[in-house]
Image (cartoon, rainbow, N blue to C red):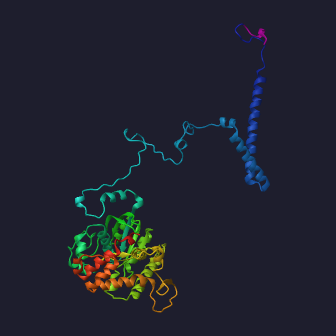
């Protein structure tokens, strides 16, 4: 720098400078920058128009690749990102809740904190505990009520079941059978069986029947009007205890809404069908409702005693009648719009035979267990039960099961092992011949008091069959 061109204060005092040259150079640079920018914009426009307007596919592809390359360069270049203008509302000063907690966490934003200071942010899981109220107001049971309360606290040991069926098909009588086996019900033990609704309507205040019929109108009419639910502890054939929440539903068509409400509370369905009447309109309606709710069904053929005492069918004809009833149920399931259900058959373990009036209930496996237990046979009851239904015959000479009927008079295994012994018990008890009856019952393992032999035939028959079949463990299975 030449100091002679500046004074002592640093002001320029030298010759005049040509300001046009500097301004012209700056202008030229601005013009060149504007021209370059216009040229880039023109090339960009031409390339875009070339992509959409060019007829040459190769030129289209080349222009498209050029555009994509420019976009990638712009995204990857930090200088370009720094030169971009970001609006105030688009700026992110803090990370969002999704970035902090993740997309699977629900975040609730409130204007003010409504949570108390003594309440934890994440509350611990509360375990619901049932308690027993005043036991004086509860019926006496054969089990401890505290044990029932403890079972209800374990969902894996709880079963919610709804009993559905046609009108007067023995639904309430089936529940009475379960209640009589788990409760101290002296009226049921001392009263004679009333198999028909007309006999029950003659004594509306009789406490020996209709444990779940709590309304006075239900007892006067002899029909259930409302759903009735109750809890009890039942045991299966392996003596494992279960908490059973059973719902007794009406069978009349006018109260089918009660059936729908009961099905929504249940995890499974017990379909009660009269052995004499078979499948009726109410049965088909109940099957359709159960399938619509996606519930599994088990069949209970009730009032089997009517085949013996009322119709007086031979054992072989009684077998055909029971088989026809089961096939009608399967046909009703298949013909239902929601007929996605497995087959119902006794050898599959989902069919039970019962008589609520006389207090007995059995399945093929539970009856087979009678043979293996009383005669100490080294046979699996499940394998024996599979051979007790269908076209399977028992050869007395060979002591084996065969599928081909060698003798025209040979009975099926179900008739030979189940129906004929059952008919013989009915015949011996109803004959009222005490000297002959005593050794027969002693051989069956049935021990009665001396006063029991003086009872009438119906009540004595209930006592004998109740001891012979025992608790309804087959129903629980």
| Residue at position x 76%, y 30% in the image | 29
Locate residue 208, reporting x and y percent. Answer: 24, 73
Position of residue 342 relative to residue 324, above or below, is above
Magenta region, residue range: 1-7
**Towards the viewer: 440 or 457:** 440
Q: Considering only vertical position in the picture, is 271 above or below 234? A: below
Q: Is residue 62 left or right of residue 374?
A: right
Q: Position of residue 307 (x, y in %)?
A: 35, 85
Position in image of residue 315 (x %, y %): 39, 87
Q: In which quarter of the image is the C terminus?
A: bottom left
- Is residue 252 at all visible to an observer of this figure? no
Give the quarter of the figure containing the N terminus.
Answer: top right
Q: Which residue does the image show at 33% across and 55% down from the upper left?
A: 130
Residue 267, quarter of picture: bottom left
Q: Is residue 3 magenta?
A: yes
Does 403 appear above or below 178?
A: below
Q: Which of 114 and 239 is in front in this view?
A: 239
**Which residue is most to the top?**
8
User: Residue at coordinates 51% horizontally, 90% vertically from top-left?
Assistant: 406
Q: How many labels does the image show?
A: 0
Q: Is residue 138 visible?
A: yes
Percent from the top left, x then y, of residue 42? Answer: 75, 43
Relative horizontal placement of residue 244, taking residue 219 as reference (left or right): right
Query: Front-most of 133 and 371?
Result: 371
The image quadrant that residue 373 belongs to is: bottom left
């Amino acid at each position: 720098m030449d100091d002679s061109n500046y004074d002592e204060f640093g002001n320029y005092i030298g010759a005049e400078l040509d300001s046009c040259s500097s301004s012209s150079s700056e202008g030229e640079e601005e013009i060149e920058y504007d021209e370059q920018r216009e040229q880039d914009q023109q090339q960009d426009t031409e390339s875009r128009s070339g992509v959409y307007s060019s007829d040459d596919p190769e030129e289209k592809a080349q222009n498209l690749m050029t555009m994509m390359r420019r976009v990638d360069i712009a995204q990857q270049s930090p200088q370009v990102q720094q030169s971009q203008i970001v609006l105030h509302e688009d700026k992110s000063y803090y990370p969002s809740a999704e970035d902090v907690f993740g997309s699977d966490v629900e975040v609730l934003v409130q204007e003010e904190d409504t949570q108390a200071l003594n309440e934890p942010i994440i509350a611990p899981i509360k375990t619901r505990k049932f308690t027993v109220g005043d036991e004086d107001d509860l019926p006496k049971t054969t089990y401890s009520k505290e044990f029932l309360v403890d079972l209800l606290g374990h969902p894996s040991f709880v079963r919610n079941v709804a009993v559905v069926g046609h009108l007067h098909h023995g639904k309430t009588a089936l529940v009475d059978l379960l209640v009589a086996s788990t409760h101290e019900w002296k009226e049921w033990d001392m009263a004679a069986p009333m198999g028909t609704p007309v006999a029950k309507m003659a004594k509306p205040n009789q406490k020996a029947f209709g444990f779940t019929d709590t309304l006075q109108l239900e007892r006067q009419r002899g029909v259930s009007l409302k759903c009735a639910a109750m809890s009890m502890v039942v045991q299966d054939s392996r003596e494992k205890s279960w908490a059973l929440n059973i719902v007794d539903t009406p069978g009349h068509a006018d109260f089918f809404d009660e059936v729908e409400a009961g099905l929504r509370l249940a995890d499974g369905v017990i379909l009660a069908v009269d052995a004499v009447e078979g499948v009726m309109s109410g049965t088909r309606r109940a099957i359709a409702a159960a399938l619509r709710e996606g519930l599994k069904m088990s069949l209970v053929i009730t009032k089997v005693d009517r085949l013996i005492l009322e119709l007086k069918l031979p054992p072989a004809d009684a077998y055909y009648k029971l088989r026809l009833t089961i096939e009608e149920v399967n046909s009703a399931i298949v013909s239902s719009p929601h007929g996605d259900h497995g087959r119902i058959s006794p050898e599959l373990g989902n069919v039970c035979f019962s008589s609520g009036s006389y207090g007995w209930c059995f399945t093929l496996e539970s009856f087979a267990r009678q043979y293996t237990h009383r005669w100490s046979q080294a046979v699996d009851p499940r394998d024996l039960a599979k051979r007790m239904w269908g076209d399977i015959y028992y050869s007395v000479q060979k002591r084996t099961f065969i599928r081909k009927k060698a003798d025209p008079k040979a009975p099926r295994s179900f008739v030979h092992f189940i129906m004929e012994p059952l008919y013989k018990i009915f015949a011996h008890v109803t004959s009222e011949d005490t000297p002959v009856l005593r050794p027969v019952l002693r051989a069956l393992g049935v021990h009665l008091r001396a006063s029991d032999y003086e009872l009438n035939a119906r009540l004595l028959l209930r006592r004998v069959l109740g001891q012979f079949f025992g608790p309804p463990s087959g129903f629980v299975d």
